Amino acid sequence: MKARSFTFAIAALAPLLLADAPKSTDPRVVVELIADAPAIVTPTGVGVDARGRVLVIESHTHFRPKEYEGPERDRVLMFTMGAKGKAKRTIFFEGLLMGMDVAVGKNGWVYLAERSRILRVRDSNGDGRADKSRDVIVMDTNGTYPHNGLSGLSFDSNGNLIFGLGENLGHTYTMIGRDGVKIEGAAGIGGGVFRCTAEGKNLEQIARGFWNPFGTCVDKWGRIFAVDNDPGNSPPCRLLHVVEGGDYGYRYKYGRSGIHPFLAWNGELLGTLPMVHGTGEGPCEVIHFDSPTFPAEYRGRLLVTSWGDQRVETYTLAHKGTSVTAKMTPLVQGDDSFRPVGMAMGPDGNLYVSDWGSSSYNLNKMGRLWRIRPTRNFKAPGLKEPPYIQPAQQKLKDLRDGKLQPGQSFEALALNHLDPFLRHAALSNIHSGLISPPLHARFVAHQKKHPGKTTLQELIRTEPDILFEYLRWAADTENQTTRPLIEATLKNPLLNYANFRAALAAIDTLDERNNPDRFNQKFALPILKNPDTPAALRANVLRYMPDDHRAIDHQQLVQWIQSNHLTLQHEAIWKSRTHLNENTHLALRRLALNPNTNIDLRLEAIAAIGNSESPNTATLIELLAFKDPAIRDETLRSLTGAHHETNSAAKVDALGTHAARRALGQPYNKDYPPAENTTAWLQRLDTLPGKPDPAAGRRIFFNRKIGTCGRCHQVSERGTRVGPDLTRIGHGSTRKGLLESILQPNKEVSPYLRPWVVTLSDGSTHTGIAMRRGGNSEVYLGIDGKEFRLDKNKIVDKQELHTSFMPPGLAHTLTLPELRDLLAFLTQNR
């Protein structure tokens, strides 16, 4: 049967979209319209064959409305570029259900990914229409959500097919290859990256721990990369270097917010691997760009389509250990109607990008196909293999194969090596029987350090790091025999908060609790209200509760502040920051003024008093009489914003310090270096007398009037989650780098942290960081750390700010010793 076709001129269509056409950020690169609706609607995957013909899946089944008029199944369109700017469209294949991706293989085979099937089709008689079709991979599952199934097609240098599977909404699955090889996916396991031959044989899983690896690619030297879509409440989406046996940290069974003790998004847990870089929202495709016609600097970069941020991004890779890091620069930016999905390079070196055409997930009769090309042939020289790649790959392979240098052990490497990829490779050689490799590694390390403690049961009770891995293993395996020990652990008076959260998370898993990543009110409230609850357990529960929870009673806080249990007192003081009234203030005052009370508690109480918009000046002036410099410094910080009478102002002014002048609202930092001169700031800090105080830095971090870091950041689950969690910031940042980010917050703003100003049809404006923008609404995170949802139908304008929520000048709210203390706090966990 002859293929149906029609021809249209690119030049004739382009003027229709001049106003909203995406633009390249590089004047040497142009973006051209190839096809527009109705010639193409809601396209997804893109491929280009050896003849330069562009193959695009046109979706008609992705969230299909009842009243939708169109083909019953998805189809593959073929666009053949002709002379004089004309392109001919034909229908190459029909019959797909939730078609997601296209990859052109050898011998004319075109590989297509549906939600639950990968097939390959071919035009064997040259009429432009596929007449042969064979299944490659079939997946049996109850999952039906369109875009968290199979996708991400690419080929490695051996001709093997690489593909991704999303989290499948936690449904079990059976993946079956052409030769009958099966992979069984357990409930809640999360997504993965897989490999099989071009025919669908020898199916195997390469890596796990993904949310939705929507796109994969293999570079010229065999390295696999993937983009992982949709990180819930833990942006950014991820660009990942995928290695054999890799674990990238996500399990669906631990919730969809991305916030859970047993989830890692950037290699936070032992045995999980970090991202190369965060990507824009909704990354759908990644390719290794090897165009000979683009300017030379583009050759060898990774290119990513960001559906949510309406752009095509480029990533320049740089050596980091046995993996890479990257720097992102946009290549193409569009308006809200530009929704790039698929992307492929043609034999002429040009790029082709499919465009969903709308921010709505539903079928919408919109859609476009774009070509991105250079203004001329730049004749870029061929790629040369970076010298670090082969040694890095060999080092990883040797360690995975069990080769050790003299004096090395897998356990020591797994726990102590600075390179997370080598730590992971070492763990892969630990064959631990019933328990997990991370638990085994910690057990062996402690045995060597403390040979007298020989049993795992004893170490679980005495060593926090071993206990955490035991709890993680219990939850991962859903081992019900661990329940008695876990329940006993929750009552342990020496239990730290991290392991309390882990123990509670393990119980949630054993109980199969829905939404295990959310506050467990059913567990927490009875413990909090029970008068017989041990103080240590009550302290952990109090910390676990949201600061503003309505069940937190002022009178109880007063009792707990006055208790004789140090940790409970500390947590009650912390909660009083958001529950300040006459009663809690009086309790804090008594504690702060008592010279026989623990000094750390006194300092926390003073900081809590200062948390008020108008702190009690009389109490704070009394505290200034104490000679202890830490008491004085914390009191002066708390006096910021206080109302002063003549007498109190005179007492503060008599101190004559920078902090005293700040407390009175007077200038105090006129001689600070320019914000751009980080080196000069460091020199000033390093010449200060005495040593930095990380504990003071912690209180400064959470102060709501100076520093104000805790308004947008969290450390150890305290603070507000707007910007990145800074709990482990000391692991990957230098002191100079941290200081520079404080001094110049707008110098480098990660794309996923840029605020958007959204205007609605009623004229109201809303500012927040984009969290989720699918479906019929968009969700943003406000500066108060709370999500807000906007109806897409009411949005009339959106503007991305290239500035940070973090305002410049925060360092100028601090004295130099305070800034030094803050840096000491942030860098103490290295």
Image (cartoon, helix red, strand yellow):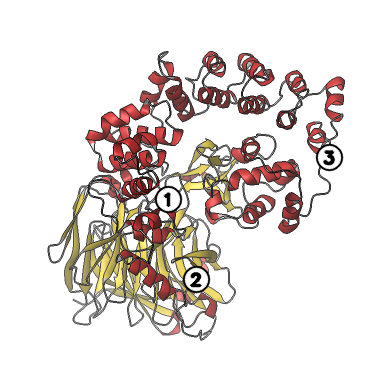
Ranked by sequence position, the earlier of labels 2 and 3 is 2
Query: Label 3 amino acid?
Result: Pro
Report how far apart the C-alphas of labels 2 and 1 lie in the structure. Answer: 41 Å
Image point (17%, 70%), residue name: 133
28 displayed left or right of 98: right
Report how far apart the C-alphas of labels 1 and 3 lie in the structure. Answer: 43 Å
| Residue pointed to by mark 3 | 667
301 displayed left or right of 89: right
Query: Label 1 amino acid?
Result: Trp
* Image quadrant in which you'd find residue 509: top left
Image point (62%, 50%), residue name: 804
Residue 579 placed where, x, y %?
Answer: 58, 22
Q: Is residue 695 visible?
A: yes
Circles 2 and 3, Cβ within 8 Å, touching? The answer is no
* Image quadrant in which you'd find residue 305: bottom left
| Residue pointed to by mark 1 | 265
Q: Residues within 10 Å of mark 2 (few under 14, many from 20)?
A: some
Vertical position of residue 596 compared to residue 151: above or below = above
| Residue pointed to by mark 2 | 14
665 displayed left or right of 407: right
